[in-house]
Image (cartoon, rainbow, N blue to C red):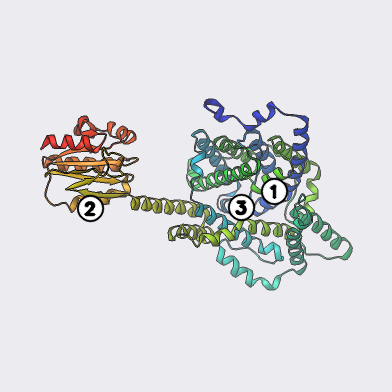
Amino acid sequence: MKGSFDFQPKLVAALRNYSKEKFFSDLMAGIIVGIVALPLAIAFGIASGVSPEQGLITAIIAGFIISFLGGSTVQIGGPTGAFIVVVYGIIQEFGMEGLAIATVLAGVMLLLMGFLKLGTVIKFIPYPIIVGFTSGIALTIFTTQMKDLFGLTMESVPADFLSKWVAYFKSAPTTHLWSALVGILSIVLIVITPKFSKKIPGSLIAIVVMTLAVWVMKTYFGITGIETIGDRFVINASLPEPDMPGFNLSTINHLFPAAFTIAILGAIESLLSATVADGVTGDKHNSNMELIAQGAANLVVPFFGGIPATGAIARTMTNINNGGRTPVAGLIHAVVLLLILLFLGPLTKHIPMACLAGVLVIVSYNMSEWRTFRSLLKNSKADVAVLLTTFILTVIFDLTIAIELGLLLAMLLFMKRMSETTKVSVVKDRIDLSSEGEIYHEDEKLDLRKGVEVYEIDGPFFFGIANKFDECMKVLGDKPKVRIIRMRKVPFMDTTGLHNLESLYRLSDKEKIRIVLSGVNEQVRKVLEKSDLYHRIGEENVCSNINEALQKANSYL
């Protein structure tokens, strides 16, 4: 699709040929996904440092917007585990207002990415970075759940990873055995559920069973000390009034890196989810429209007290497996969650915190991708360096730093690899044209007259090979009368490459040496034509092949 249709939501196309059969299929899928999303939205909300209703509100509003505007037919949006670490950190340092500002900024960034058609570019983020910070987030989430999983009595939980585990071991004697039993049984239920039920998720069964069990233990057996959601939060079963966060330049400057992290995470996870869904449904998502939908969702939810949202792979796959094939299923899922909040919201106060911790332990295990992590350790040293750097920085320091340094390291290693593929050589006597594409006769060889040198640049001519070019210049012996720069294997040239050529031209001009360019392709020629160098070298000295270049060089001797 071209033009304005590039930014058309998938819902528009889906409704053109909509039928009663499709609606009933979407209705069943939407109801099931809504029920599946309930415990996850609550768990992600609490783990992020907000109330369970804020997690639900995020799933409702963001889920509706992402399905309404999205570029995928089956994407289900809402809060995800990927955001837990960064959201919790922002709340600790800047409070809820800071989180609202960071989420709005992230929404603006995602909108810009979509409108600037950067959806395809996001897919080129190196895989070791994605696995590194995903595994790091998983380990961090697992670590944060130990207190609730075992019912530990602690005044406060330290912020950093290592201090958390030291504090946990010191608090081990305070373990509440009934809470630990609830947490462990929740994990067991989630693990064994797929063996007898593919449709109903284990997390939902665990929450229903363990909530009833804890209620019975409290009511009939007098067992106390098992903390529930109601012991920590007050559930307000209604949608909040919109509230405007206080924007100021100083806060925006401080929160910009965190907002960038939210935007990058949201873009990667949503497009990864959409790509996985495409592989199952055979459809093709519009990555730019998907980014716009994610941006709109994150722009709106903060005004209702919500947290960052993105496409959720597990809920999207649940939607597909239960027959959802259009965005209508995602809209129904949001409505189902709204009805649950309004009419069943108060019942959520009975859910044990240890059970939610068990749900998040399984979520962190599924996120960890430990098998992929292990296999990537067998790759090149460069990939391993990127993977481990991103992972360690995510766990020990900060997700924002991890993503920024991970991307920087990946770019540096990419430039190193690119520079290694580019070769610069000097020919002074004979050019072998066999298998070159510029030949006139088989095994033709061109002898160079005395006073002519040929520089062969094989690969991209960019700032990564500037030193190679300079080193090649320094080892030259006798000064020629004509220098031919052979560029037939140069696919592109950047500003630094152009600067290298200008330096060579100035040096040669001072020594009365002519410069002739050979085999310049159309893209490189356009770069040259925009510079003064093109006119200084002379259009007649920019040749299409080596034969023309040699004829021109010989005419100057």
Residue visible at 70% across and 59% down?
A: 357
> Which residue ends up furthest to the front in the rendered image?
442
- Nearer-N-terminus badge (3/2): 3
Mark 3 or mark 2, whichever is nearer to me: 2
* Quadrant location, the N terminus: top right
The amino acid sitting under disc 1 is: Ala
Q: In the rendered structure, which amino acid carries the disc numbered 3?
A: Ile
Looking at the rendered structure, the secondary structure element under dot 1 is helix
Mark 1 and mark 3 lie on one chain; the one further toward the N terminus is 1
- Amino acid of disc 2: Glu
Residue at image coords 67%, 60%: 361
* Mark 2 crowdedness (10 Å alpha carbons): few <14, some 14-19, many ≥20: few
Quarter of image, res 141: bottom right
Question: In the rendered image, is residue 351 in sight?
Answer: no
Query: What residue lies at 68% left-to-right and 26% top-to-bottom?
Result: 16
Residue identified by numbered label 2: 471
Q: Earlier in the sequence, mark 1 or mark 2?
A: 1
| Residue nearer the viewer, 179 or 90 | 179
Residue 71: x and y in percent read 60, 35
Per the rendering, the mark at residue 84 is 3
Compared across the picture, whether 5 is left or right of 404 comes to right
Horizontally, is 428 left or right of 241 in the view?
left
C-alpha span from label 3 to label 2:
50 Å
Label 1: few (<14), some (14–19) or many (≥20) C-alpha neighbours in 10 Å:
many
Where residue 386 sits: x, y (%)?
Answer: 46, 57
Which residue is labeled 1 in the image? 41
